[in-house]
Amino acid sequence: MIKRHLFQFFSIILFLLFAGCISTCADGSITLNPSECPSQPPSITIANWNVQILGDSKEAKPELMAFYADTIKKYDIVFIQEIRDADGSVFPALCSRIPEYNCNISSRAGRSSSKEQIGIIYRKDITLLSLRDFNPDSMNRWERPPVMAEFDADGYHLSIYNIHTKPTDVPSELGALESIALAPGNAIVLGDLNADCAYYSPKEHIHFLSWKWIIPDNADTTVHATDCAYDRIIMNPKSFAEFLNYGIYTEGINSSVSDHYLVWVNITTQEN
């Protein structure tokens, strides 16, 4: 008898769903009136992607550039690492495919003839308040000095530090980054930090201890057979109070696209 009543109950629920009489809210609850669904807090999603030697050869492949653009448009603020072309044409070409976004780029950095830039792509309704490029660094602390970008998203202020560390100098470069990551308020560090496997062992995991490491050590952010969490997101306590979710985006990313997956974090723009 109980089973029969349960069957009838769920049959009615399914009928009402298909008939459009009831709705499912974003939190999974069911309601007869969609306006009664709990309101979702406004949020932004911030991503980092080391696209592996973004230069003239990749610029010459329209399908690949279209894939980069389509992936970037899933996020609100995106940092693109390993922009390598000397003539500076590839980043504007990429940005031309996403006219609803603004673009900025760092200076070319690197101690050797191999130079890299960091591209910053953000929705046009988000304001870039300031951009600090730590290159050149008179103290020579990094192979590729970081950038710090400060944003305003609907009145929510956020400072983001981005760096691509030198694999063999991860501990020292992270220590130097920690010494300058002093922006007041909400702050995030993200990038290809190479902070795992042979480059950053557990005993060296002594940096940003008061911050929250969002991408766990057992994650894999690499395309190839290696199982390493090289790409990281680290949030200070104030920004972590607004944390909602994170992820590693892998769909369609193979060795012809990059040797890294894209990592992202979603935060509410309501101060907690």
Image: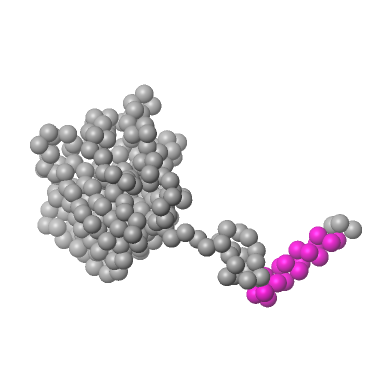
Describe residue 86's horizontal placement relative to residue 81 as left or right: left
> Majority secondary structure of the magenta segment?
helix
Residue 186 position (above or below residue 125): above
Describe residue 11's horizontal placement relative to residue 202 as left or right: right
Picture quadrant where residue 69 is located = bottom left
Describe residue 236's horizontal placement relative to residue 14 as left or right: left
Residue 9 is covered by the magenta coloring = yes
Residue 121 is covered by the magenta coloring = no
Work out which quarter of the rendered image holds the N terminus and state it.
bottom right
Describe residue 148's horizontal placement relative to residue 42 as left or right: left
Expressed as whole percent of the image width and height from the top left, the position of residue 232 reads 36, 42
Front-most of 152 and 3? 152
Expressed as whole percent of the image width and height from the top left, the position of residue 99 reads 27, 69
Front-most of 160 and 116? 160
Expressed as whole percent of the image width and height from the top left, the position of residue 139 reads 12, 33
Question: In the image, what residue occupies the spot 14% across and 49% down?
Answer: 108
Residue 172 position (above or below residue 98): above
Question: In the image, what residue occupies the spot 61% across and 59% down?
Answer: 28
Question: In the image, what residue occupies the spot 38% across and 46% down?
Answer: 239
Question: In the image, what residue occupies the spot 81% across and 65% down?
Answer: 8
Expressed as whole percent of the image width and height from the top left, the position of residue 34 reads 59, 70
The chosen color scheme is one colour
Front-most of 149 and 115? 149
- Which region of the structure is painted magenta? 4-21
Residue 247 position (above or below residue 7): above
Residue 251 position (above or below residue 63): above
